[in-house]
Structure formats: structure tokens, C-alpha cells
């Protein structure tokens, strides 16, 4: 993904409403969580049904931001998608978007024992991280996952959203996160999609109506961490 810049016309609108470009320009790391959404083989590995190759390019930024947040006392949450048997009936309308062969590929690869369910091999989980399994695009809707209870248990008020795809599970999760009362930031160079246009449009819509969009380095500055210093 090409570096995202807030378009000039939108920056003017945001400044008129907020008085500043970024709504959230200070983070308390101890009450901040980073959601790493769907950085799994199914969405990143060549040959998988929903591979977005650009997601491989954001791995260093996601790992770096996670390392910095942990060091500052924040929480890292791995949000992974599962193609569940429950969804065959409860989310049948979604499955109608696939032809039979594609549906079967998704269920096999993204099932809990599938190759697609596994994290991309260069992701770097660490002791103390949380893992949440979701079963819908948004991690926050009823029945999808227990992510909200995890965040509440850790007294989180600010959430950084990273992962793939920007305009699908990441945006869906980020929107609902904001509407559950969390200060929500989509990390522009910590998200990726299938095309640059999809990525850019999702970020534009989110910063306009739902929360904030910042780069990895901007987040680190606003968190009081010098950018670029974490181990790769």
C-alpha cells in the first residue's frame, strides 16, 4: 500500500470540526490495546481464496508497533477469523456470496485445523498477548467474539486497529469498536487491502465519521515513544 495522506479537502473539513487533524493526539499506553486482525495465511498466502498480497508488506509495522506498545505497558490482542460450523446456518446469507467450491475451500482452510487459520509465519506474538477468535467480519457484534470483555477486563479506553483487510474486517471491527465507546484509531500503514483504492476509501470514511487514522510513527509519537526504535 502507498503511504496514506489525508486529502487536502478532507483535512480542511476535519480542522473546521475538530480544530486539529487528529482527534486523538495523546495515548496512555497502559489503557491502550492494539488489535491485530486476521493476519492469517488465508488472507496473506498466495493461492488462498482471499489472499491480499499487500498484507505481507505491513508485517514489519505491525510487529514494530506491537513491540513498542508492549514495552510501554499496553495490550496486544490477536483477533483471528474462524470459519465455524455454527456459521453454516447462522450466517447462511454470507455463504450465499460464494459458489460451492469457494465455500468449501473457505470452510476447510479457515476452519480451526486449516492452514489458512494459522498466523502468517513472520508475525511475532509474545507472552502476555491475548488471542480472540471471531466468527463474523466485526469482532464486536453479538456472538462474534469476546473481544469487548477482554478489553474491559484490561481497563482499555483506546484501541489501535491493524490487519487485513482494511475495508472488510478491520473497518467493520473499528466502526463497532468506536460505537462501543472506545477511542479508535485505524493505523494507516498497519492495514492493507486488495487494492489501493479500497484501502484509501476505507481510511477516508473512518477518519471522517468514526475515529482517527494515523501512521505507525504518528501513533508512537502520540504515545510518547520515539518512532523507529523497536526491534524488527
Image (spheres, helix red, strand yellow):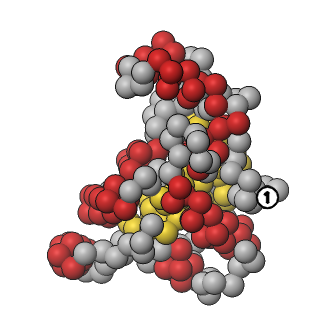
Asked if residue 54 shows in the view, the reply is yes
Q: Nearer the viewer, residue 192 or 204?
A: 192
Q: In this image, 152 relative to 94: left or right?
A: right
Bin the neighbour count of mark 1 within 10 Å (Cα to Cα): few under 14, some 14-19, many 20 and up.
few
Residue drawn at 64 percent across, 69 percent down: 60
Report x, y in % for residue 172: 41, 45
Report x, y in % for residue 76: 66, 57
Q: How many marks?
A: 1
**Quadrant of the rendering where the C terminus is positioned:** bottom right
Report x, y in % for residue 106: 56, 28
Residue 10 vs 145, above or below: the answer is: below
The residue singled out by tag 1 in the image is 126
Q: In this image, 220 relative to 15: left or right?
A: right
Residue drawn at 25 percent across, 75 percent down: 7
Residue drawn at 67 percent across, 59 percent down: 75
Direction right: furthest residue: 127
Q: In this image, 58 relative to 3: left or right?
A: right
SS of the residue under disc 1: loop
* Quarter of image, res 221: bottom right
Asked if residue 24 shows in the view, the reply is no
Residue drawn at 49 percent across, 26 percent down: 102
Q: Nearer the viewer, residue 132 or 3?
A: 3
Direction top: furthest residue: 89
Residue 217 vs 24, above or below: the answer is: below
Direction bottom: furthest residue: 226
Residue 146 vs 85, above or below: the answer is: below
Report x, y in % for residue 125: 75, 56
Residue 49 vs 103, above or below: the answer is: below
**Quadrant of the rendering where the N terminus is positioned:** bottom left
Q: In this image, 110 relative to 160: left or right?
A: right
Amino acid at each position: 500500500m502507498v503511504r496514506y495522506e489525508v486529502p487536502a479537502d478532507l483535512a480542511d473539513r476535519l480542522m473546521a470540526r475538530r480544530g486539529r487533524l487528529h482527534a486523538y493526539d495523546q495515548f496512555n499506553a497502559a489503557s491502550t490495546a492494539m488489535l491485530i486482525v486476521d493476519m492469517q495465511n488465508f488472507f496473506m498466502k498466495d493461492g488462498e481464496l482471499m489472499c491480499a498480497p499487500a498484507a505481507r508488506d505491513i508485517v514489519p509495522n505491525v510487529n514494530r508497533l506491537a513491540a513498542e506498545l508492549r514495552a510501554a505497558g499496553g495490550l496486544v490482542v490477536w483477533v483471528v477469523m474462524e470459519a465455524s460450523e455454527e456459521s453454516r446456518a447462522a450466517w447462511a446469507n454470507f455463504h450465499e456470496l460464494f459458489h460451492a467450491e469457494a465455500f468449501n475451500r473457505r470452510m476447510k482452510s479457515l476452519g480451526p485445523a486449516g492452514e489458512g487459520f494459522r498466523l502468517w509465519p513472520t508475525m511475532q506474538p509474545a507472552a502476555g498477548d491475548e488471542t480472540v477468535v471471531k466468527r463474523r467480519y466485526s469482532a464486536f457484534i453479538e456472538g462474534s467474539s469476546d473481544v469487548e470483555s477482554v478489553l474491559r477486563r484490561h481497563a482499555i479506553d483506546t484501541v489501535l486497529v491493524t490487519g487485513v483487510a482494511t475495508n472488510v474486517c478491520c473497518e467493520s471491527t473499528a466502526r463497532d469498536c468506536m460505537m462501543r465507546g472506545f477511542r479508535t484509531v485505524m493505523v494507516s500503514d498497519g492495514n492493507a487491502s486488495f487494492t489501493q483504492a479500497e484501502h484509501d476509501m476505507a481510511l477516508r470514511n473512518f477518519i471522517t465519521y468514526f475515529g482517527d487514522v494515523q501512521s505507525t510513527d504518528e501513533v508512537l509519537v502520540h504515545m510518547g515513544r520515539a518512532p523507529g526504535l523497536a526491534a524488527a
